[in-house]
Amino acid sequence: MSFKQDEGHIYNARDMAVYLGYLLDIPVILSSATPSMESYSHAKSGKYEYVRLVSRYFKRASLPTMILHDLRNEKSYGSLSQYSICKIRECLASNKQALVFVNRRGHTPKVLCRSCGWKVECRTCSAWLCYHHSTDELVCHYCGYKTSMPSCCHECGKENLIGIGTGIEKVFHECAEIFHGANISVLSSDTMNTPNKISKAIEKIKNNETNIIIGTQLIAKGHNFDNLNTVIVTCADALLYGDDFRATERTFQMIQQVSGRAGRTDSRGAEVVIQTYNPDDELMQYLKHNDFDGLYEMELRNRQALGMPPFGKVVSIIVSSLSEKALSSFANTLVRTAPKSPGIKILGPIQPPIYKIRSRYRQRIVVLSSKPLHEYINRWQESWKVPSSIKLMIDVDSYNFM
Ligand SMILES: [Zn+2]
Ligand SMILES: [Zn+2]
């Protein structure tokens, strides 16, 4: 597991703890059901001492059965397949609880005009506004901007706007319709915005007052629900194809953590249904067989072939500016003046998927090497003349920034 601070100075709390342990000569224990690739690889190579808990905490608890449900022949248009609906019905009939995992907040992540294709985007970010049914507002998930839903298209004037995609609120409405009379709790950062609200919802689940839990990653960690028997992962593919070399690792960790909520104690026969269009994908197969080692070994092979951590070093240089022109010129100069050094590859400048946030345009430059990059970056930095219009951030060990 890792905790990464993303604002201000970018650092990884895990790495800091290890370094502090080294400086003060005290042992550090890293404990996780889903360690990072780096920690796993250090454990395997003997750099870290590896203690493996082979049985689950409660002796009688068995690992849940993982089921891959192929969506390619699915006739239902909702976010739950017919198969998943049957599984939840069976689960409710035996007085157990079901969890539906969704990775998007809000109701409808995208709104556009059917006549001309106009996208409803944020004023200051190059991002879609997400429709939130609970507040009847459009919200930017990058800067927090809120506005009401326009009645017609701002380009062609037609009243022909439609929503695309599925957020947690929409899944809630679908479930309320399909599972009549079931008590449903929604756990997302929109509804559960105070610790008090979260603990009340958790309490209700533990007291069996909730039949179906619908949750985003908020639900993925730290809570054990004894009566939880069925977990549905609605969006495995969306997790898997992220813009980041860590997407596979994160998908695996997320699915492991969500499925870890089920069958923690004596609840035999817990099932996890992963809805996917890619059931033959290697990652999916490892998940199906609960094959933790196989999956890590596969991912380590892929990382080695690409020279990505833990085999290579990656540093991202992220530059942003209110002026697109100033940004592009600065980023290009930066790359042009990078010191030549054997074994060091520089990629970019590259436009990230969210090119603009809070009116600031963004570019990233990625530095790859098989050796530590500190000295190289320090040497390069001496030649940088960063104008006041440009903000520059250095992110070590990361490739992705939205
Ligand atoms: Zn239009
Ligand atoms: Zn915004």
Image: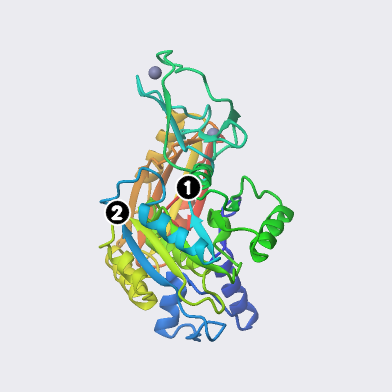
Percent x, y of residue 77: 36, 42
Q: CA distance from mark 2 to mark 1?
A: 23 Å
* Residue 245 visible in rendering: no
The three-letter amino acid code for the residue at tag 1 is: Ile
- Asked if residue 123 lies left or right of residue 235, the reply is right
Is residue 308 among the parts visible in the rendering? yes
Residue 402 place in picture, x, y as percent = 45, 46
At 71% from the left and 51% from the top, the residue drawn is 194
Q: Nearer the viewer, mark 2 or mark 1?
A: 1
Q: Is residue 300 above or below residue 24?
A: above
Q: Is residue 280 left or right of residue 396?
A: left
Neighbourhood count class around disc 1 (C-alpha, 10 Å): few under 14, some 14–19, many 20 upward: few
**Element under disc 1:** helix
Residue at which label 2 appears: 277
Q: Is residue 98 above or below residue 320?
A: below
Which mark is on residue 178?
A: 1
- Up/down of 197 relative to 302, above or below: above
Q: Residue at x 51, y 81 (%)?
A: 61
Q: Look at the picture and state if 396 lies above or below 57.
A: above
Respond yes or no on whether mark 1 lies under 8 Å from ligand 1: no
Which sits in the foreground, 288 or 210? 210
The quarter of the rendering in which ligand 1 is drawn is top left
Identified by mark 2, the residue type is Tyr
Dot 2 crowding, Cα within 10 Å, few <14, some 14–19, many 20+: some
- The percent position of residue 322, horizontal first and vertical second, equals 52, 30
**Which numbered disc flags the more N-terminal residue, 2 or 1?**
1
Outermost residue toward the right in this view: 196
Q: How are the residues colored?
A: rainbow
Residue located 54% across and 86% down the image:
59
